Amino acid sequence: MQFRDLLLQGGFSLTPSEERIVQVLLTDYPTAGLGTATSLAKRAGVSDPTVVRLAIKLGFEGFPDFQQRLLSDIEARLHSPLLMMGAKRPDLGTDGEQGAAIAYMHSVAGSLDKALTTTPLATYERAARLVMDSKGKVVLLGGRYSRHVAGMLASYLSQFRANVAYIETLSAQQLDLLVDLGKRDVLIVFDYRRYQRDVVAFAEQAAARHVRILLFTDPWVSPISDFAEVTLSCPIEVSSPYDTMAPAVAQIEALVAQIFAATGERTRRRVEELEQIRHESNVTLNEARAHKNQSNGASRQKLQ
């Protein structure tokens, strides 16, 4: 098993501090693991002993053994034909035959590949439990662009559980929602560079009220991570003046898949009830046509 796969696999019960170390290692792989245990601990915002405990939990004798395995993996990759093929891949610049649009799509695909290897399974599992085990509200909030991703996740979660609220814009009226939030509630925040002051302030006030926080952010990490219980980061840089939200969308859909797999029959029953309501209300064109066909069939039977 490759070193990166070891970090990504499930089966380990990681603490929040250990998850932060793993995310640092995956986000800046392999460079983050090549320094000292102290430098890695500093980047992850944890103590030196936490780094050592993680190494032991992953099956190594200590940090030196952990680092030696990483170095061996790097050496093997440097000599692999697959890596050489990737290094010799043709340039996809804007002046090539493919043009700017296709080159951009390739860069987005690259970001999605990186997103696959920056968040361990354990983090998705903890995020799913945080969202679905909450006995109170689940409130979603994002920045200028990321609020649209927050809205998408809110639509998904509304199918899985009750008491989901989406804050589209932070008006004075929406700020008043803080008065009703407490330790039973969860705030899901999307905050990417350039981190938005009002979003950070709202999350900070929520944390002060003991609201549990799930953060979606970028590799540079929003200040909200200082008080978030679970943090999922993803790459956003592409060959464009604008950062991409595609990896963020992929992450929320991955979280939805994890929730559905973990909650099983309970979630399925709720979705079935929602579908029945939509069917009876002719929500979609297909349902409206089905009702029309049924009505026409009933009318023909009466005529006969």
Image (cartoon, rainbow, N blue to C red):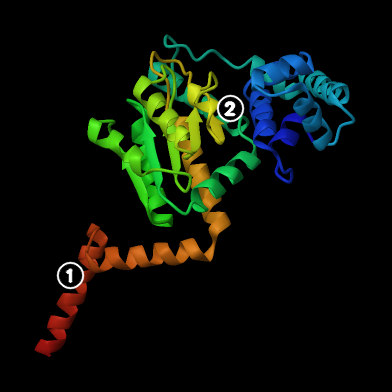
What is the spatial separation of the Cα atoms under label 2 and label 1, in whole angstroms? 48 Å
Question: What residue lies at 34% left-to-right and 46% top-to-bottom?
Answer: 165
Quarter occupied by residue 147 = top left
Residue 124 placement (x, y as % from top left): 58, 42
Mark drawn on residue 292: 1
- Of callouts 2 and 1, the N-terminal one: 2
Question: What residue lies at 71% left-to-right and 20% top-to-bottom?
Answer: 41
Would you say residue 30 is visible in this rendering?
A: no
Total count of labels: 2
Q: Quadrant of the C terminus?
A: bottom left
**Residue beneath disc 2:** 114
Amino acid type, label 2 = Lys
Amino acid type, label 1 = Lys
Quarter occupied by residue 32 = top right
Question: What residue lies at 35% left-to-right and 44% top-to-bottom?
Answer: 180
**How many neighbours does mark 1 have within 10 angstroms: few (below 14), some (14-19), or many (20 or more)?**
few
Would you say residue 57 is visible in this rendering?
A: yes
Residue 265 placement (x, y as % from top left): 52, 66
- Secondary structure type for disc 1: helix
Compared with 221, 232 (above or below) is below
Tag 2–tag 1 contact (CB < 8 Å): no
Closer mark to the observer between disc 2 and disc 1: 2
Question: What residue lies at 64% left-to-right and 35% top-to-bottom?
Answer: 16
Judging depth in this view, the residue of 263 and 15 nearest the camera is: 15
Looking at the image, residue 70 sits to the left or right of residue 16; the answer is right
Residue 279 placement (x, y as % from top left): 28, 66
